[in-house]
Image: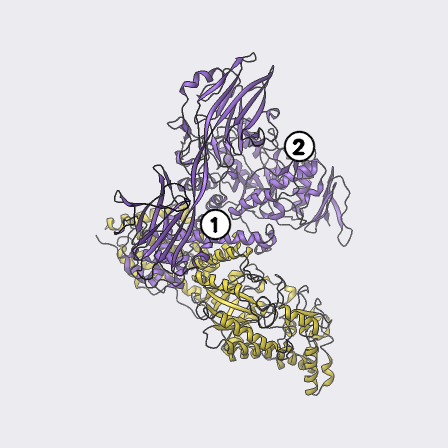
Chain colours: A purple, B yellow
Amino acid sequence: MSTVPIEPLLHHSPLRHTSLNGARTFLPSSLNLRCHFTSKKLHSIGRSVASGNSLGFLSSERRRSIAIRASSSDTAVVETTSQSDDVIFQENFPVQRIDKAEGKIYVRLKQVKENDWELSVGCSLPGKWILHWGVSYVGDTGSEWDQPPEDMRPPGSLAIKDYAIETPLEKLSEGDSFHEVTINLNLESSVAALNFVLKDEESGAWYQHKGRDFKVPLLDDVPDDGNLIGAKKGFGALGKLSNIVVNPDEPGADVQEKGKSSSGSTKEGKGLEEFYEEMPISKHVAGDNSVSVTARKCPETSKNIVSIETDLPGDVTVHWGVCKNGNKKWEIPAEPHPEETSLFKNKALRTRLQRKDDGNGSSGIFSLDGELEGLCFVLKLNENTWLNNRGEDFYVPFLTSAALPVESGAAQVSGKTPKTNQEVSDSGFTAEIITEIRNLAIDISSHKNQKTNVKEVQENILQEIEKLAAEAYSIFRSTTPAFTPESDLESEDEKPEIKISSGTGSGFEILCQGFNWESHKSGRWYQELQEKADELASLGFTVLWLPPPTESVSPEGYMPKDLYNLNSRYGTIDELKETVKRFHKVGIKVLGDAVLNHRCAHFKNSNGVWNLFGGRLNWDDRAVVADDPHFQGRGNKSSGDNFHAAPNIDHSQDFVRKDIKEWLCWMREEVGYDGWRLDFVRGFWGGYVKDYMDASKPYFAVGEYWDSLSYTYGEMDYNQDAHRQRIVDWINATSGAAGAFDVTTKGILHAALQKCEYWRLSDPKGKPPGVVGWWPSRAVTFIENHDTGSTQGHWRFPGGKEMQGYAYILTHPGTPAVFFDHIYSDYRSEIASLLSLRNRQKLHCRSEVNIVKSERDVYAAIIDEKVAMKIGPGHYEPPSGSQNWSVAVEGRDYKVWETS
Amino acid sequence: MEVSVIGNPQTKIYRTELTYRELGFRFGSQAISGESRNRVSFLTHQSSKWKEIKIQSSPRSVRCEAIVSDQAPFLKPTPNSRSLEGVKLFVGLPLDTVSDCNNVNHLKAITAGLKALKLLGVEGIELPIFWGVVEKESPGKYEWSGYLAVAEIVKKVGLKLHASLSFHGSKNPEISLPDWVAKIGEAEGGIYFTDRYGKQYKDCLSFAVDDVPVLDGKTPMEVYGGFCESFKSAFSDYMGNTITGITLGLGPDGELRYPSHQDGTNLSGAGEFQCYDKHMLSALKHYAESTGNPLWGLGGPHDAPAYDQQPHSTPFFSDGGSWESQYGDFFLTWYSSLLTSHADRVLSVASSAFKGTGVSLCGKLPLLHQWNKLRSQPSELTAGFYSSGGHDRYEAIAEIFAKNSCRMIIPGMDLSDEHQSPASLSSPESLLAHIKTSCKRQGVVVSGQNSAASVPGGFERIVENLKDESVGVDLFTYQRMGAVFFSPEHFHAFTVFVRNMNQFELSSYDHAVEGDKVKTMSIGSGTTGAASLQTA
């Protein structure tokens, strides 16, 4: 009937000054505009668009979600451009060229005596090779791995969660590029088969066998999925082995079975045969080259002269186009074209660069019309090899002669040519973004795609700001020695009143881990736990961590499948809700164990690989990271470490993040969870976690960032700063929206207590040596959990010394977590006394700790000047001065006092 | 009609605002009323508008837009508050931006940080320039290269620059006065402020030597003048375009005051008088003799408390104590006159040096809010702020600033009374208001700064201060860039603050909307609402 007259609305919008949604929107564009424009029109566009909150994309949650993408910006730009006045663009782009190195992998099974066998895996290419392996036990079905028994693990092995072991390959001899690892097998164990893949730590590439794990059967009846090696099946399988390309885009590898040089002699013992097999392997070796681009404005002809130089060997062809009218669409410039140029499908030009005289690389000069806005190009090395700029076309902007280039890709948005270009600001740096905004403004009046454009610009600016601030932060931080201690970092937090933040809760939280590795067995864990609610509340816990609630391939819940199916081995969804309600009634907040790193698939893809999901979140293989060859994901490379037993979720995909956020919010709403314990957060970037926390607004959240401490010759290093720095970096990436388990403190307590080396408990600055010494409010201290202890015992706290551990974490800053098994053990009354002391004395996550003694056999500290503690057999008594100390709790090798 | 509206995002945007408006209205009428006059008027205004929209909103979106656009802006500035759009925001660079070997420290971080600030909409940057760095080696030999490099970066990024010429030293980071000055200080003695224990304050020259040729035959004022001239010529390319303001260091930490509180002394005390260097003492003696009380010129007050003593632990500052006596008036008048004349000297030197360059001159005052609920206001007295007969202690200073067309920087705009310890009898808010009034009376333009350490609720307090229209503060410098500044928690708070500065808003009103919005969302009306408009 009528069209909507947008224009007058924008012109006279009265919303300009309103604060209607100011608290949630973040509007740098309008801030900028204030500096550069007086155009009311623009301003109001900024406002109106920002008010488009129906989609929520500009809400403050969103603002935070557009977080920092790890890379740092190239600040050198500022200096380089100042060298010459007519240079309008100069940058050196690093490019990676991939070369192929060829070699072989061999697998040898050898009998040593009777039931003792040896499996050797070797590789002839140089590299930092790691054997990533696990076993299948007799009776196992499915393709999952288990960890091998302790005695099978060669020295130097590292347990990766509870599914696999990583063992480095050792050089056979100095100067030789052969690497090998040998595993001793005992046929009396119940190991049915050995599974492995090879990993090159240098390139992060995985080498597997026909798209699968290598599998060495030790029994006859191991099901053949076509990936067996050696033994009887191996012979027969030879013919159907094929060349599996892992991922042609990545520096991955092909392994192809060519043949094998030996056949084993049949032996007794479960019919196992010796064998030796070789497979050719090729490894992609990255060559680092660079492309340097300089653009000049020729003052006489007002042409843009672009020179492209590179040290790439061989023929290099520039495949290019020019940009007009503010968009990055490739167009063909008017003739004349440079020498050696051909037209490609009317879309682009191809110019071969001239070899340099010295033979090292090539270069070319492009003279382009002064009115053009930019030059886009990619490089072509040969038919199949193209090089671009980290996934994007190279782009050389000419637009604003005074402008410095904005980070490539930072703010390139399509739009119309600005009709009023004379107003371009004298300041270099932001000119481009401002131009974009101006373009958009013009665009909007013709209302055409404006929403996406404005959104993009907004996001780009926000992203840029956060990226820059993060960069500034990291440098400033690193110029101060080590980490900025919390006292500086959080001085604003030192208000007396309680401030709730998802990283800390109230600051006075005490966690109870409400399950162990066996809890699923009864099938009615939720109900059993419910009955303990009053008891746990009276002990003084404020937060309860429940096991992962989703349908899971493994009964413990850590292999989730359908995230919306909350019927698990722990009970039904209704029982879960009831349990949460019950705990809320006694004043305990409840954390859900959210497994976000990986998810088990419902279906196989056409190659027979399990990577398609079902249920409400029926993602396809785009939701799976690309760099784990097990699962042939089509997503991006993982932003963290991979967990190899299940497809790792690619959190860089917008649809994945959207779904996860929705799911978390649903769990908050539906189940009533107050917060999260986040499983295996090493697997993906902390910035995503921040995004999720912002969306789900938990009361408390803690992530499991578990990796190994540093050891030298089997002896734990005194200085574990690198270890805690990694955890702190993760917390930082979440912007402090989640805390992290203080693995460092647990590790150091192990060494200190086990070997009577209590001096370890003070760092060189006299602070606690774990995360708790650097960022106490985000450190969740613990001594045991379902993985480290319980029936798994991957990294058990020194036996008999648990109470010393609790005396430490329950008196110190950080948020302590107590393991379920310990509450229901002989330690119960002692733990109860410590809990009640902590609550009575109001110790909290930021309490001040003053280490008064850290010697060989005793560690003592005074916390907040009202609690004193010592652990270790040595002697310590708190000073008998003005304060009147009385013993609060006492036990084997520990003692805690309080002031009365 | 449907076709033209569907798929047009503008419509949706518009719709969202409708929702907000409704919510705001509902909340406004109950919760906010009575908070302050302007808020109420704001909401009333808005609510009437909402009604109109509501009536019109369904079938003809065209109509309602017409109504919207005919309206006057929602926010009518009311007498006591104003929009902050006119306030320019500056951020201070780290004190050690340029090292004493003229290197730019953390160059990369600063560059990245400046870009971030530029994108945020910050107007400019304050750069502390230290005498001890530039004229380090020998008198008259200036080395500007480090600071010039910073100015170039600032210019490139497109920010304005505010240079603070600092004639003082700093403890943290450690930046001392020029080496050659320190040497003279060693050899000669008496050029630094000195307390009654004979302890020298080596980070600033005594006010008493201003016009005494103690520096290789030159007076400090001549040396400062040379410094200013050299700065002017070295930065001539930037003057008036990139550099828009220059702050003159007037005393310890750049502030116009005596170093009555020194590092390591307890701030809980009132501070001590610093009149014991030989030049001070001889000036005092001279003054005493000229006023006919030679016995009063032998030293400072004998009954003033020590640094860490409570002000009223000795008679000087107590009610009816020495400070109110004839002697007290004699001493304090003299003591404060030196402060005033020092300010006058430095500002005159600078205003003649920078005349015609188009930059504005500033000087910074301290906010001596401790103990200012005591009648004697001892912190101000030891720092040199006094006026005989109970007159305005800041009047004379403001007059000097006015005479030299100099802006006054007042720090501590982030401090609020409620966060002060009751025992310190401190009221930063009322002191700030007092100084602002004095400035207004003299026609001095006020710029703001925050205090050095971050304080709870600081940003909110700053915004409140800037909104106060009785004295228009049109420039605020936030101190200071560094690791803490860019830490995720702080930087986020800062961006919120910047946004608040640029979009004037009433926080409680805003919360109300937010709270209600959540409710709406849970009912799920957000998107369906938009849909219904489309199909209407």
Q: SS of the residue at dot 2?
A: loop
Q: Is residue B398 visible?
A: no
Q: Is residue A577 left or right of residue A784?
A: left
Which residue bears the numbered disc 1? A72
Task: Please tell me which residue lies in front, A79 or B19.
Answer: A79
Point out which mark residue B470 bears. Answer: none
Label 2 resides on the chain identified as: A
- Residue at 53% in and 36% down: A579
State how far apart marks 1 and 2 are (Cα). 50 Å
Estimate the x, y position of residue A454 in percent, counting from the top left. 35, 53
- Amino acid at dot 1: Ser
Label 1 resides on the chain identified as: A
Task: Please tell me which residue lies in front, A275 or A876.
Answer: A275
- Disc 1 or disc 2, which is closer to the eye? 1
Point out the tag, 1 or 2, that comes first from the N-terminus: 1
Locate residue A256: give its quadrant: top left
Crowding around mark 2 (Cα neighbors within 10 Å: few <14, some 14 to 19, many 20+) is few
Is A751 situated above or below A213?
A: below
Do the residues under discs 1 and 2 have CB atoms within 8 angstroms? no
- Residue at 39% in and 47% down: A357
Which residue bears the numbered disc 2? A825
